Image: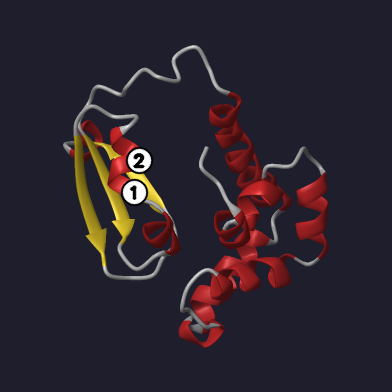
Amino acid sequence: MDTNHRVAGAYWHWYFLSQPEPFPERVIGANPDFFYETCLVGWGATRIGDFDDEMLAAYRRSWRDPHMIHGSCSDYRAATVDLAGSADINRKIGCPTLVFFSAAGQMAHLFDIPGEWRKRCENVAEASLPGGISSWISIPMRLLTY
Protein backbone atom coordinates (compact mmCIF):
# COMPACT_ATOMS: atom_id res chain seq x y z
CA MET A 1 0.00 0.00 0.00
CA ASP A 2 3.05 2.25 0.38
CA THR A 3 4.33 2.13 -3.18
CA ASN A 4 6.33 4.94 -4.74
CA HIS A 5 8.34 5.49 -7.91
CA ARG A 6 11.32 3.48 -6.58
CA VAL A 7 9.14 0.46 -5.79
CA ALA A 8 7.26 0.75 -9.09
CA GLY A 9 10.54 1.01 -11.02
CA ALA A 10 12.19 -1.93 -9.27
CA TYR A 11 9.07 -4.10 -9.26
CA TRP A 12 7.48 -3.14 -12.57
CA HIS A 13 6.79 -6.82 -13.23
CA TRP A 14 4.23 -6.89 -10.37
CA TYR A 15 2.10 -4.39 -12.25
CA PHE A 16 2.72 -5.89 -15.69
CA LEU A 17 2.09 -9.54 -14.82
CA SER A 18 -1.11 -8.73 -12.91
CA GLN A 19 -2.78 -7.16 -15.96
CA PRO A 20 -5.89 -8.96 -17.24
CA GLU A 21 -5.28 -11.87 -19.55
CA PRO A 22 -4.28 -12.32 -22.27
CA PHE A 23 -2.19 -9.14 -22.46
CA PRO A 24 0.96 -10.16 -20.51
CA GLU A 25 0.72 -13.76 -21.75
CA ARG A 26 0.83 -12.59 -25.37
CA VAL A 27 3.64 -10.10 -24.81
CA ILE A 28 5.77 -12.67 -22.99
CA GLY A 29 4.79 -15.46 -25.39
CA ALA A 30 6.10 -13.48 -28.36
CA ASN A 31 9.65 -13.93 -27.02
CA PRO A 32 9.74 -15.77 -23.67
CA ASP A 33 13.53 -16.20 -23.72
CA PHE A 34 14.04 -12.44 -23.99
CA PHE A 35 11.51 -11.68 -21.24
CA TYR A 36 12.68 -14.25 -18.70
CA GLU A 37 16.41 -13.92 -19.39
CA THR A 38 16.05 -10.15 -18.90
CA CYS A 39 14.34 -10.88 -15.59
CA LEU A 40 17.05 -13.34 -14.52
CA VAL A 41 19.83 -10.82 -15.02
CA GLY A 42 17.84 -7.69 -14.22
CA TRP A 43 16.64 -8.51 -10.70
CA GLY A 44 19.98 -9.13 -9.07
CA ALA A 45 23.67 -9.51 -9.68
CA THR A 46 23.28 -12.60 -11.85
CA ARG A 47 24.59 -12.96 -15.40
CA ILE A 48 23.43 -15.50 -17.97
CA GLY A 49 26.94 -16.97 -17.86
CA ASP A 50 26.36 -17.85 -14.18
CA PHE A 51 23.96 -20.61 -15.27
CA ASP A 52 25.29 -23.83 -16.70
CA ASP A 53 23.90 -24.91 -20.05
CA GLU A 54 21.71 -27.68 -18.64
CA MET A 55 20.15 -25.38 -16.04
CA LEU A 56 19.43 -22.66 -18.58
CA ALA A 57 17.95 -25.22 -20.99
CA ALA A 58 15.59 -26.44 -18.24
CA TYR A 59 14.50 -22.87 -17.51
CA ARG A 60 13.89 -22.24 -21.21
CA ARG A 61 11.80 -25.41 -21.62
CA SER A 62 9.67 -24.31 -18.70
CA TRP A 63 9.17 -20.65 -19.55
CA ARG A 64 8.36 -21.40 -23.18
CA ASP A 65 5.26 -23.32 -22.06
CA PRO A 66 2.14 -21.13 -22.47
CA HIS A 67 0.59 -22.80 -19.39
CA MET A 68 3.59 -21.80 -17.29
CA ILE A 69 3.40 -18.23 -18.59
CA HIS A 70 -0.29 -18.10 -17.72
CA GLY A 71 0.39 -19.58 -14.27
CA SER A 72 3.07 -16.98 -13.57
CA CYS A 73 0.72 -14.16 -14.51
CA SER A 74 -2.11 -15.70 -12.48
CA ASP A 75 0.09 -15.75 -9.39
CA TYR A 76 0.55 -11.98 -9.64
CA ARG A 77 -3.14 -11.45 -10.42
CA ALA A 78 -4.06 -13.31 -7.23
CA ALA A 79 -1.90 -10.92 -5.21
CA THR A 80 -4.04 -8.00 -6.36
CA VAL A 81 -6.84 -9.31 -4.15
CA ASP A 82 -4.92 -7.84 -1.20
CA LEU A 83 -4.84 -4.46 -2.89
CA ALA A 84 -8.61 -4.45 -3.32
CA GLY A 85 -9.07 -4.83 0.44
CA SER A 86 -11.34 -7.20 2.24
CA ALA A 87 -13.46 -7.43 5.37
CA ASP A 88 -10.58 -8.98 7.32
CA ILE A 89 -7.82 -6.63 6.11
CA ASN A 90 -7.01 -5.63 9.71
CA ARG A 91 -7.18 -9.15 11.10
CA LYS A 92 -3.78 -10.61 11.98
CA ILE A 93 -2.53 -14.10 11.14
CA GLY A 94 -2.29 -16.00 14.41
CA CYS A 95 0.22 -18.76 13.71
CA PRO A 96 3.96 -18.17 14.15
CA THR A 97 5.38 -16.83 10.89
CA LEU A 98 8.95 -16.76 9.59
CA VAL A 99 9.77 -13.72 7.48
CA PHE A 100 12.76 -14.69 5.34
CA PHE A 101 14.35 -12.03 3.14
CA SER A 102 17.59 -10.93 1.53
CA ALA A 103 19.30 -8.25 3.56
CA ALA A 104 20.90 -6.74 0.45
CA GLY A 105 17.76 -6.93 -1.70
CA GLN A 106 15.92 -3.93 -3.04
CA MET A 107 12.95 -4.43 -0.70
CA ALA A 108 15.21 -4.36 2.35
CA HIS A 109 16.40 -0.94 1.22
CA LEU A 110 12.87 0.32 0.64
CA PHE A 111 11.00 -1.16 3.62
CA ASP A 112 11.37 -2.55 7.12
CA ILE A 113 10.33 -6.01 5.95
CA PRO A 114 9.82 -7.67 9.37
CA GLY A 115 7.97 -4.53 10.49
CA GLU A 116 5.64 -4.74 7.53
CA TRP A 117 4.82 -8.37 8.32
CA ARG A 118 4.26 -7.53 12.00
CA LYS A 119 1.36 -5.37 10.79
CA ARG A 120 -0.27 -8.59 9.45
CA CYS A 121 1.04 -11.33 11.76
CA GLU A 122 0.92 -11.71 15.55
CA ASN A 123 4.06 -13.81 16.02
CA VAL A 124 6.90 -12.97 13.62
CA ALA A 125 10.36 -14.50 13.56
CA GLU A 126 12.80 -13.07 11.05
CA ALA A 127 15.79 -14.37 9.16
CA SER A 128 17.81 -12.91 6.32
CA LEU A 129 20.57 -13.83 3.93
CA PRO A 130 23.23 -11.38 2.73
CA GLY A 131 22.37 -11.94 -0.95
CA GLY A 132 20.69 -9.55 -3.31
CA ILE A 133 17.53 -11.41 -4.30
CA SER A 134 14.96 -8.71 -4.36
CA SER A 135 11.95 -10.32 -2.75
CA TRP A 136 10.77 -11.83 0.47
CA ILE A 137 8.59 -14.66 1.61
CA SER A 138 6.66 -15.42 4.74
CA ILE A 139 6.18 -18.98 5.90
CA PRO A 140 3.73 -20.02 8.60
CA MET A 141 5.98 -21.79 11.07
CA ARG A 142 3.61 -24.78 11.21
CA LEU A 143 4.67 -25.64 7.67
CA LEU A 144 8.28 -25.93 8.76
CA THR A 145 7.50 -28.72 11.25
CA TYR A 146 6.29 -31.23 8.65
Residue 20 image position (x, y, % from top left): 77, 37
Residue 131 image position (x, y, % from top left): 33, 70
Residue 99 image position (x, y, % from top left): 28, 45
Give the alpha-carbon distance from disc 2 to disc 1, as whole Å: 5 Å
Residue occupying image coordinates x 63% and y 65%:
61
Q: Quadrant of residue 138?
A: top left
Disc on res. 113: 1
Badge 1 crowding class, 10 Å Cα cut-off, few under 14, some 14 to 19, many 20 or more, is: many
Residue occupying image coordinates x 29% and y 42%:
115
Disc on res. 61: none
Q: Nearer the viewer, residue 14 or 58?
A: 14
Residue occupying image coordinates x 33% and y 50%:
112
Residue placed farthest to the bottom in the image?
Answer: 49
Asked whether disc 2 touches disc 1, contact meaning CB atoms under 8 Å apart, the reply is yes
Q: Which residue is mark 2?
A: 116
Residue 39 image position (x, y, % from top left): 60, 67
Quarter placement of the C terminus? top left
Residue occupying image coordinates x 48% and y 80%:
51
Instruction: Indicate the amino acid at tag 1.
Output: Ile
Q: Nearer the viewer, residue 4 or 96?
A: 4
- Residue 116 lies left or right of residue 127; in this view the side is right
Up-down relation of residue 145 to residue 52 (above or below): above
> Circle 2 — which element?
helix
Q: Quadrant of residue 32?
A: bottom right
Instruction: Indicate the amino acid at tag 2.
Output: Glu
Q: Nearer the viewer, residue 38 or 59?
A: 38
